[in-house]
Amino acid sequence: MAAAEFAYELKRASFAYAPDTPVLDEVTLRIASGSWVSLVGPNGCGKSTLAKLLGGLLAANSGTVMVEGRELTRESVPEIRPRIGMVFQNPDNQFIGSTVEEDIAFGLEGRCLSRKEMRARVKRYAEKLEISHLLAKHPAELSGGQKQRVAIASILAMKPGIVIFDEASSMLDERARGELLQIWQDMRRNGDYTLISITHDAEEIMASDRAIVLRGGAIAADKTPAELFADEELLQACRLIAPYRVRLLQELRNRGMDGAGIIHGWH
Amino acid sequence: MRGKLLIGRSIDTGSWVHGVDPRAKLTAMLLYLIAIVAVGSWPALGVAAVFSLAYMTATKIPLNYYVRAAKPLWVLMVFIFAVQCFTVTEGTVLWQIGSWTLYSGGVSLGLISASRMALLVSFTAILTFTTTPGLLNQGMAGVLKPLEAIGISAQRLTLMMSIALRFIPTILDESQKIVKAQAARGADLRELPWKEKGRMLVSLLVPVTVGAFRRAEELVLSMESRGFQIGAPRSEYHLLVWKRRDTWFVLSFAILAAGVLAYRFLM
Amino acid sequence: MAITFEEVSYAYDDGSLWRSGALERVELEIRPGTFTGIAGTTGSGKSTLLQHFNGLLKPTAGRVRVLDAVVNAREKAPKMRELRRRVGLVFQFPEQQLFEDTVEKDICFGPLNFGMSLAEAKERAKWALSLLGLDESVLQRNPFHLSGGQMRKVAIASVLAMDPDIIALDEPTATLDPQSRAELAALLSTLHREQGKTVIVVTHRMEELLPYADGWVIMKNGRTLFQGTTDALVREAAFLEQEGLAIPECITLWNKLAAEYGLEAEKPCLTPESLADRLAEVLAAEGGAGEREGRRA
């Protein structure tokens, strides 16, 4: 498939659940194919709504949303949706099947794939996410981190080009969060996927290419993660805290020391 | 939290009953239901009991699991027994208090009715004990297919059942958690007098309902983002092959039903 | 001791096919008036442990002492009412337990259940709200119309309003934004310092509590892998990491620094400010960066 240059091009896209109270107010942005973008901002800034708009689960009231060069409309949604996968916050509520195997197969059944193709994909993506030994398990027997792996396998098995993670790590423990970050880095490596992640997690933002800051339904900043974490005022507004390492460097700099020179030796 | 949930949990012992086609099992259960309803005498009950025990043993699942499956309904069984004792006026007089007389026919019928109930509940547990929910759904879809001729969507019905089977345990777990959370706030149902219990019910019902709706909402989003559309054609992940063994399985239940019916109405 | 566990085991569905051991011969001591963090991977038994603190779960073996109550595996449990008031337990996502149509009614639920008068309960509601830094105007609002972070605080206030001696919270900061998490951790520390409460917090983000906690309990597979002071935890970090615990960066950075400058015996500096201060001192004492580079080469 010839990949479009941009996974998304939004032009003045607005959305409101109720008239006169826009949740998204004329959002214009471009996301390059194969890039990894963090969507950040305080709660209620419209991040999740934007994610649903990008996922084709909501339609913009005005403006345009282009996905891989095609405009998202009511008519084109059924054709464009298969290009986009979404992983949500609560691992339990997106586990549709009653076993891991069935859950991965759920989306494939909807594509009317042959049984042979389904089995092959279940096997392949279970291996990829290292859950082959769990295929027969019921969700009650899995940890949150394992369930999120299943959710990702279910999405990737449908071969999307874009994967949107809506606070997908926030209910996981420290270790599972680290593993998820690793999965994202693997997905990013070959450039097969455009990753969009809504997150508060400093490490996750730091690992991405670009941070888009939403405030009051509009884009307040569009920076590299390093720039974002250097902007104390913006961090306050987004209710974020920089990674420990970044804060330490700042404190050392405040004391007139060359933080980078000191810390570098430790790695 | 793993609770004490028997609903929707299969126990894999690898017996031949586990391998029976789910459509055969569902049909067999319907025949069993007919047979049990028709049981009206001690010999018929005896035959049904022996038949049931034989199959229960064949599943290699410890018999006390079947007993436990019927346990929650013991109040209902006692009630059925009592009703028969009060209303039937056949046989010899066993006991007389004031205007009320207990007849031997009442006791006999009461025992038969209560035993029927116990058999039915514990035996139908075979279905969920030996079949994974996914297979059960697919079996259900097969059995219900004829209904489409009269305009009932089998897909809708099975979807409803599969989601119920998948989420009832989760919601029960969550209810248990809320019961505990409220107990920690001094509303322990076990320690409160009866008239207070009613008042406490709202402190459980509101959070459980709100939680169930939140889950439903997230589940719908997740299904939609995996391309699910109600009524759209789907392929099936599990392959169901009807074997000769399945025919014999159904036939054995048909013979039981026919026998019991014949005994009841012809003898 | 506020809480003592003697060889406590607990199994869900004891005696069935699904029996699953959640706690295995746990020994635990938590002193009154301390701030304790509990960490460990998912399924290590942290939540099960917490539910033994106020008698919601009864051990299947061993003995639990909490304040002056004793719960033995083999004996019938005593009436838990008084213990429940004195040990406040805040579950994961406590906002999901709210049910009344005003914040005030919801916070008064606990105190009223424990036999306080309405006037007293309302006083307590105000007090608890102020402890969590919420404005009194919230009292008459519908809890379901508050933001997620505010709902969380209201739910915690509803347990605090019972004025417990011990308050144990299961991942109170989960899913909140980083600044709300830091604020909540600081509030819990205030409860401990200013109100003298014994505070016990289960967390997946150890770095949040490290500046405040006196002691730590690390769980793995239903057993206590570690119990001791924060300083001891920092010293044992390598071992704990080997056992699968994710060690926060503030600890690994400190340990590297301590190894490099021989500071192992010192109290660890676990915030960027304190670490930067300490580094400045160390470097000044060494007589500047040039000499340091020379020594390293």
Image (spheres, rainbow, N blue to C red):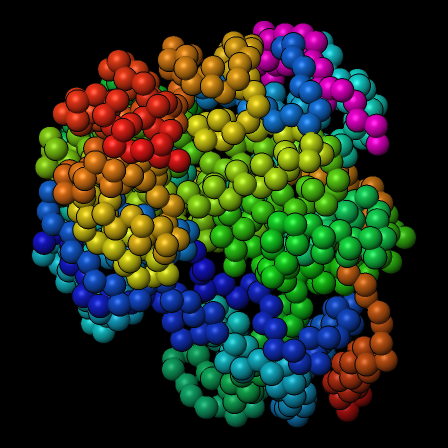
Compared to A80, does C71 lie above or below? below
Query: Camera-side residue: B58 or A101?
Result: A101
Q: Which residue is drawn at 64% across and 81% down?
A: B59
Residue lying at the far right of the rendered structure: B149
Quarter in which the C terminus of chain A is drawn: top left
Report the side of A236 relative to B236 (left or right). Answer: left
Compared to B150, does C207 lie above or below? above
Q: Quadrant of residue A186?
A: top right
Rendered location of residue C21, percent (x, y): 38, 67
Q: In which quarter of the image is residue A164?
A: top right
Quarter in which the N terminus of chain A is drawn: top right
- Report the magenta residues as a range: A1-26
Rendered location of residue C293, percent (x, y): 29, 27
Q: Which residue is drawn at 66% across and 65% down?
A: B132
Q: Is residue C106 visible?
A: no
Magenta segment: does it hold C217?
no
Q: Is residue C28 visible?
A: yes
Q: Which residue is drawn at 10% across and 47% down?
A: C32
Query: Camera-side residue: A247 or C224?
Result: A247
Magenta segment: does it hold A22?
yes
Rendered location of residue A208, percent (x, y): 55, 27
Query: Camera-side residue: C30 or A3?
Result: A3
Compared to C149, does C28 lie above or below? below
- Give the main secondary structure of the magenta stretch: strand
Rendered location of residue C55, percent (x, y): 24, 57
Report the side of A225 relative to C250 (left or right). Answer: right
Q: Residue at x 25, y 22 (%)?
A: C289
